[in-house]
Amino acid sequence: MSTDLQAFREETRAWLDENCPASMRNKMVHFEEAFEIYDTDDARLWKARCAERGWIAPLWPKAYGGAELSGAEYKVLQEEMASLKIVPPDTGMGLAMIGPTLLEYGTEAQKQEHLPRIAKGEVRWCQGYSEPGSGSDLASLQTRAVIEGDHFVINGQKIWTTGANHADWMFALVRTDPEAPKHEGISFVLLKMDQPGVTVKPIQLISGSSPFCETFFDDAVALRENLVGELNRGWTVGKRLLQYERSSAPAPKKKKSVEPSLNPYARIAKAYLGEDAGKVVDVEAREKITKHVMLERAMQLTVQRVVAEATSGGAPGATTSIFKYVGSTLAKEGSSLKAELRGFAGVGWEGESFDADELESTRSWLRDRAVTIYGGTNEVQLNIIAKRVLGLPD
């Protein structure tokens, strides 16, 4: 490591340790609870401090609120935050999805209007893609946008709009030419959520939470200046945004443990199945844990490598569907394994006989049944991998 990079690491570690509030450490951030986690005084303070340094969007240009860190510096920042078990100052679709898309496809005016607010954590975004009957076959969407002067008038419905009940803005795919083939005649627009004609209804899931919503448009408005890319050519922009989403696949979740050296599966197995000479007693459980942890680690290392390549100037491609497929499958299987290792204690919904971790385990198991469906089903990802990565015929 160069002297400059080592100095950056030492300065970064000291600043993080001094400025990150204690309540923003040792937490697991799941998108279903993200709004609540960041809606606190400490979270807002932490966000403001990082925004001042450009560390909410550290790779973005300084002109748009970022810090213009190099790939090596960004890796150091991530490592030091992980070492101190610090929660990122902000998260969400602004940073992971629409921000990178605007950097690539947005006009200068769009970048100046939207990116600095994302980089300061001042605005929350949601995605208007799926519709009833147009999920896996997204290109069949029917939400209409008609041009009237300097704006679009939008009518239709979106579904599974994550965080729409908390969002300030939406990026949406809308049909602007109903006569064109279904992959054409689609445009990519940005619209405000707080306006007449936009109605949001949360959907309760079997996990008990309501992160997804139905969103209805009745003569809602999107300004022409907030058309991203070309009119009727939004499918290209929309696909690229999904590649950015999938390239930002997170590492498998980890909670604070009383035994930090243990992976969470081994800790649970020892607590519920017993241990002998430091090993999980149940041989079959040991084998399942070993295989799963090896797959998680392989996924982590692959994501780190691809992120490093991207920070060196590369752009995400169809291979990001591999991340979505593998990551969602691992998340679902990991939650199932934790519940299985707990036995009957892993299927409790409520009651004094279950502790908080056991109740959360049940909800995670139920919640993660959906991860191989939302954001593009596993079947869709396999089709993309077959066609775009392996080059197989239709």
Image (spheres, helix red, strand yellow):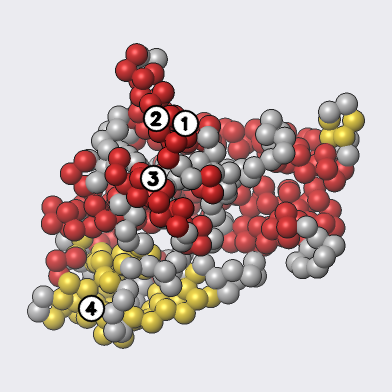
Q: Are marks 2 and 3 in contact (CB under 8 Å)?
A: no
Structural distance between the alpha carbons of marks 2 and 3: 34 Å
Q: Which residue is mark 3?
A: 318
Q: Which residue is mark 1?
A: 80
Which element type, helix, strand or loop, lies under badge 3? Answer: loop
In which quadrant of the rendered view does residue 355 lie?
bottom right
Say left or right for 382 vs 192: right
In which quadrant of the rendered view does residue 112 lie?
bottom left
Mark 2 or mark 3, whichever is nearer to me = 2
Mark 2 or mark 1, whichever is nearer to me = 2
Three-letter amino acid code of the residue under disc 1? Glu
Q: In this orientation, which residue lies closer to the viewer: 84 or 244?
A: 84
Mark 1 or mark 4, whichever is nearer to me = 1
Q: Which residue is mark 2?
A: 12
Structural distance between the alpha carbons of marks 4 and 3: 32 Å
Q: Position of residue 381 (x, y in %)?
A: 48, 52
Q: Are marks 2 and 1 in contact (CB under 8 Å)?
A: yes
Three-letter amino acid code of the residue under disc 3? Ala
